[in-house]
Amino acid sequence: MSDSLKICKGLVTLLFLTLAGPASAAKPFTEGMVTITLDDGWTTQYTLARPELNSRDIPATYGLVTRAIAEGWGGYMTLTQAQTLVSEGNDIASHTLTHPDLTSLTPPQLLSELRDSRAWLETALGLPAVPNLVVPFGLQNGPVLDVIRQHYASSRTVNAGRNFRDTVVYDLRANDVARNVPVSAVQGWVDQAILEKSWLILVFHEFTNGTPTRDTQYVTSDFEAILDYVQTSGVRTVTLSEGVALTERRTHPDLTAGFFVYTDGLQNGFANWSWADHSLDETNVVHSGTSAIRFEPDTWNGLMFHHSGIDLSQYQSLRLWVHGGTVGGQAVRLVLHDGAQVLGSIRLDTALGGAIAPGTWQQVTIPLASIGASTGMLQDIYFQDDSGTDQPVVYLDDVVFLPN
Ligand SMILES: [Zn+2]
């Protein structure tokens, strides 16, 4: 796609945003921003990425696994190297003591991972404060977040998307730049951040000058190309701490409009367990805000959004918007599941009272009582192909449980 076309598309999206109104209020910053985060504390971040960042005067945020440094784990930075990052003006975030799945820990283990890693960084690196957490695997839920809020000013996930002034700072979105992500894709994300004045956080892990052998390795020359693009684009570069300071520091989602499953990205602790071909960051066909869900409902494949548990008795209905793409008529089944059994299920065309229409957004409201799901602890929401065949792409947006 040519640059002018890309800009045209962006303008169309902006125009649509204006027309679509405040269904999902994403407040822009004064300008687009990019943050480079480097997770885990790999030696190659120090030896290969750091010189490229330094030569361009781009400060980064390093999310360090503290026991790896303290105990000298192979492949990780030394304490002296971590101290050098600080003296060179970089931002340091905690990435816990040992990089566990925080949702699997006992309360004392969780407390130790969060509190002791921060304390170690403050002491070992001579930092007055380490306010930000990079969540291992991006996995957090309500009980974990309760403890994170007590010890940190923000937490960064690996849910794709961009951040806005009113983004909940304990649910910061970040785009993972894994081995297979081309430079051009990252350039597109930077362009989008500039256009919509959002905050793009990029995540890198290891670096290599050769051919990557792991998904988490990125080719150094491609990293250089990304940094060059960031510089020539003129986008503002900020550290995680600087970016958080420019937000409204919202700590909790606004639930008055309902309990969102998805709007611009997964919300409220939902994790993406989907196995269908899909994107949670579709930007060309969007109902409101900046992004929608695109998915291929083929051969029983589905979207699956997992939660630690939602008491459905608090809600009267599930509302969402569906767009049939160019063709429409897809057979897609919504299933609410408690992890052991189906709580309720309905096809979207049945709920609509007619086929999913092409070329337009339609609102679907499903009273939970109508599908026998007015009680129960929801864990999984599925949108699944109900045809067993190859169907055209369908789009979803603004999936929300409406309170009683
Ligand atoms: Zn990590």
Image: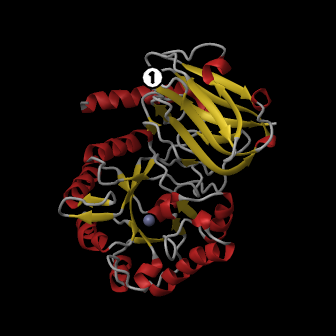
Residue count near mark 1 (Cα–Cα under 10 Å), binned few <14, some 14–19, many ≥20: many
Image-quarter location of ligand 1: bottom left
- Residue 109 lies, with reference to residue 210, above or below; the image says below
Residue pictured at 66% horizontal, 69% vertical: 150
Q: Quadrant of the C terminus?
A: top right
Left/right placement of residue 85 relative to residue 279 reads left
Which residue occupies the foreground of this view, 71 or 146? Answer: 71
Residue pictured at 34% horizontal, 50% vertical: 235
Quick one: SS at disc 1?
Answer: loop
Residue pictured at 37% horizontal, 82% vertical: 83
Q: Which residue is mark 1?
A: 391
Residue 170 in the image: state x and y as whole percent. Answer: 59, 58
Residue 53 in the image: state x and y as whole percent. Answer: 28, 65
Specify whether residue 267 is in view.
Answer: no
Specify whether residue 128 is in view.
Answer: yes
Left/right placement of residue 52 relative to residue 289 reads left
Residue pictured at 45% horizontal, 23% vertical: 389
Residue 390 in the image: state x and y as whole percent. Answer: 42, 24
- Quarter of the rendering containing residue 119: bottom right
